[in-house]
Amino acid sequence: MINIVLFGKPGAGKGTQAEFLKDKYNLTHLSTGDIFRYNIKNDTELGQLAKTYMDKGDLVPDEVTIQMLQSEVDKNPQSAGFLFDGFPRTLAQAEALDRFLEAKGQNITATVALEADDNILVARLLERGKTSGRPDDQDEEKIRNRYQEYNEKTAPLMDYYKAQGKFHAVNGIGTIEEVTERLTNVFDSF
Ligand SMILES: Nc1ncnc2c1ncn2[C@@H]1O[C@H](COP(=O)(O)OP(=O)(O)O)[C@@H](O)[C@H]1O
């Protein structure tokens, strides 16, 4: 069983690459952003709560996100492994994930960060915002707020995983295929 965390700033290409990686390595792809958006679309209680944060580019509170993620993992007991995309995003989430997996006799195998320059990413998100319908992709101020959230709350997680010898970085700039190949090289080493 392998459990991988895919890191990367908003727009780094996590979702695009996860689509390929989950098939190649037979992993269950869990994207917290996608799950929240699904709940917003279906107007669930969780969706209504998450929306107030997401629309501003703020993180959804840890308690809500952790509980949701755990229930998604529990919905897939037959899974051969998970590809976590957009989770964990805070130290509290990372610690909760470790405890949760440990209770199941599992752990995080490795984390892989897709790295890219902020200015390139902002341009990508504004472009995506033209067609994605995502309110958080259409306004540069909200986008910048997501980067601030990332730098303050998510970036410190790299040290958390580095200290465990579980951190790998991949250059996220290039064609989709080039980035896929770099990721595949890293995944093949697990
Ligand atoms: N692990 C998480 N903790 C808190 N909020 C989250 C988490 N994952 C997603 N969200 C919320 O969903 C939004 C969109 O997430 P996501 O689709 O992963 O987009 P991106 O990485 O492009 O910003 C985030 O800005 C945040 O509000």
Image (cartoon, rainbow, N blue to C red):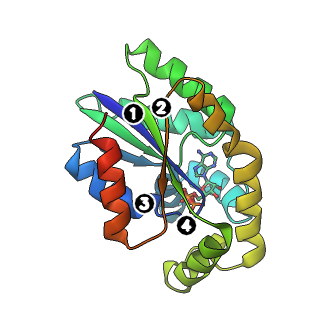
Spatial CA span between label 1 and label 3: 18 Å
**Amino acid on which the number 1 mark rests in the picture:** Val
Label 2 secondary element: helix
**Do we see residue 54 in this rendering?**
yes
In this rendering, would 76 be left or right of 69?
left
Q: Residues within 10 Å of mark 3 (few under 14, many from 20)?
A: some
**Amino acid on which the number 4 mark rests in the picture:** Gly
Q: Position of residue 77 (x, y in %)?
A: 28, 28
Label 1 secondary element: helix
**Residue beneath the point at 39% across and 16% down:** 104
- Observer-side mark, 4 or 2, equals 4
In this rendering, would 4 be left or right of 58?
left
Spatial CA span between label 4 and label 1: 25 Å
Q: Position of residue 52 (x, y in %)?
A: 71, 59
Q: Position of residue 74 (x, y in %)?
A: 37, 29
In which image quadrant can residue 127 be found? bottom right
**Residue beneath the point at 49% across and 65% down:** 41
| Mark drawn on residue 70 | 2
Residue matched to label 4: 11
Q: Position of residue 110 (x, y in %)?
A: 43, 33
In the image, residue 34 above or below residue 73: below
In the rendered view of the protein, which quadrant contains the C terminus? top left
**Do we see residue 19 in this rendering?**
no
Residue matched to label 3: 15
Instruction: Kindly tell me whether mark 4's CB lies below 8 Å from ligand 1.
Output: yes
- Observer-side mark, 1 or 3, equals 3
